[in-house]
Image (spheres, rainbow, N blue to C red):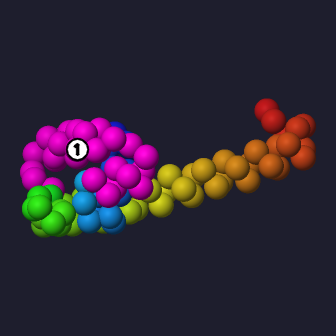
């Protein structure tokens, strides 16, 4: 499982369609579709119900979405922690060991 797949799936669920998620993410629709397909292969379950009006998550898709939320939140927390540490180290370079 790759972070790009997690982010693509999260965007698709939030947007309600693959094409809308692609537009909002500034990624091509085929690239988003490929990320979703690869994530479904990894999970060995369908994650989306695809219709001409958009997508909805399957039961497995809902579980994966909940974990995607946690993973993305943790990624943001890590970035914030590292940024704060960098600020500290910029002020006090002698702390670098």
Vertical relation: 42 (above or below) 67? above
Residue 11, located in which quarter of the rendered image? Answer: bottom left
- Is-magenta flag for residue 29? yes
24 vs 91, left or right, is left
Nearer-the-camera pick, 91 or 18: 18
- Image position of 84 (left or right of 80): right
Q: Quadrant of residue 31?
A: top left
Name the residue nearer the viewer: 35 or 17. 17
Is residue 6 rendered to the left or right of residue 40? right
* Depicted 57 relative to depicted 29: above or below: below
**Residue 84, magenta (yes or no):** no
Label 1 crowd (10 A; few <14 / some 14-19 / many >=20):
some
Q: Specify whether residue 1 is in view.
A: no
What residue appears at the point 82 percent right and 49 percent down from the top-left corner?
Answer: 88
* Residue linked to disc 1: 33
Camera-nearest residue between 29 and 71: 29
Q: Residue at x 32, y 58 (%)?
A: 20
| Residue 64 visible in the picture | yes
| Vertical placement of residue 12 versus 94, above or below | below
Majority secondary structure of the magenta segment? helix
Please report the residue visible at 16 percent of the width from the left and 46 percent of the height from the top: 40
Which quadrant: the C terminus? top right
Boundaries of the magenta span: 19-47
Image spot of residue 19 (x, y percent): 28, 53
* Quadrant in which the N terminus is drawn: top left
**Side of 97 where 25 appears, left or right:** left
Q: Identify which residue is drawn at 18% across, 63% down.
A: 54
Residue 46 locus on image (x, y percent) = 10, 53
42 up-or-down from 11: above or below: above
Point out residue 75 in the picture as x, y percentages from the top left corner.
50, 52
> Seen from this angle, which residue lies furthest top?
97
**Element type at marker 1?**
helix
């Amino acid at each position: 499982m790759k972070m790009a797949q997690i982010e693509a799936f999260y965007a698709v669920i939030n947007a309600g369609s693959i094409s809308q998620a692609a537009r909002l993410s500034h990624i091509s629709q085929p690239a988003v579709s490929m990320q979703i397909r690869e994530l479904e292969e990894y999970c060995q379950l369908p994650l989306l119900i695809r219709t001409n009006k958009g997508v909805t998550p399957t039961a497995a898709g809902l579980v994966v979405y909940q974990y995607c939320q946690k993973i993305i939140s943790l990624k943001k927390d890590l970035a914030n922690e590292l940024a704060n540490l960098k600020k500290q180290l910029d002020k006090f370079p002698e702390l670098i060991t």
